[in-house]
Amino acid sequence: MTTRLPRLALYAALVIITGLFLGPFGWLVITALKSTSELAASPVHWWPHDLKWGNFADAFTNIDFLGYARNSLIIATIYATLVTLSSAWVGFGFARLSAPGKKQMFGVLLGTMMLPQMITLFPTYLIFAKLGMVDTYWPWVLWGLSGAPFLIFLFRQFFAGMPRELEEAAIVDGCGWSGIFWRIFLPQSWPALATSFVIAFTWSWGDYIAPMLLLSNDRSTLAVAISTSYVNAQGLPVNNWIAAGTVMYVVPILLIFLVAQRGFVTGMSTSGLK
């Protein structure tokens, strides 16, 4: 009995915390199922009297939902793939190679994580405008190739924990550092690769400011379209359509996480010793 009580208390705390996290999403779903009059009612209607499933159809058909989703998918996939590979390459260098000033450079890299996005976004926009890259996908290609400080740190920590015997055996066999990375370390790092891809995809899929600045309406992303395109004849936002569109907008992220979640918790860095 004494051992069961702490476990019950732990489960109760986990249920409460889970409810706090799921509460906003649950309220979003409820809002998506309300009518316009119920949204404007005072006092608040906590539960809709008649579930308006047609709000999802209206949110899907009142904008080019699939077209904007395709744009978001292209941008997020390009960025997530490139930034994962480039961050893994840089993280490998910080973890396994020796060079003068490496620790100082790594400290500067970590310091850039404290810079807000707005500080670098506008100078970057001016550079892309001068280069004629506005309203193209090239900014996300270049951002992906430049790596991300947090992901570089993630890969550096992962590669630093891998046994030294892996690269020593490869060097004895005549393999260079590039081959060691692509043939040995990268295949062993699929948990970090999955984690990095999901994080980067989520960053890009949920980004609003950069697509708003750099892309025209036809090339814009689903995040921008949902926040700006659901309006009535008076130009006022239709909140139940916005909520329904947002629920559908979250689905791809949930699917990607469900597919890649094993990468967060499985994989042993020493498996290459076999």
Image: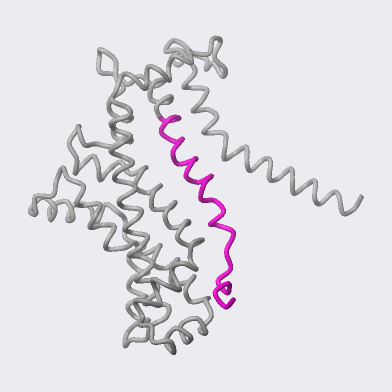
- Residue 93: image quadrant is bottom left
Front residue of 170 and 223: 170
The scheme the figure's colours follow is one colour
Front residue of 257 and 13: 257
186 left or right of 217? right
Looking at the image, which residue is at 35% across and 53% down? 80
Q: Position of residue 73 (x, y in %)?
A: 33, 41
Q: How many marks?
A: 0
223 left or right of 220? right
Q: Position of residue 28 (x, y in %)?
A: 49, 28
- In the displayed structure, 58 sits above or below 123; it is above
- In the displayed structure, 213 sits above or below 138; it is above
The C terminus lies in which quarter of the figure?
Answer: bottom right
Looking at the image, which residue is at 31% across and 60% down? 115
Looking at the image, which residue is at 28% across and 31% down? 67
Q: Which residues are magenta?
A: 246-274
Q: Position of residue 242 (x, y in %)?
A: 38, 25
Magenta segment: does it hold 263? yes
Q: Position of residue 5 (x, y in %)?
A: 85, 49
Magenta: predominant secondary structure element?
helix
Front residue of 207 and 79: 79
- Residue 220: image quadrant is top left
Magenta segment: does it hold 53? no
Looking at the image, which residue is at 29% across and 34% down? 224
Q: Residue furthest right?
A: 1
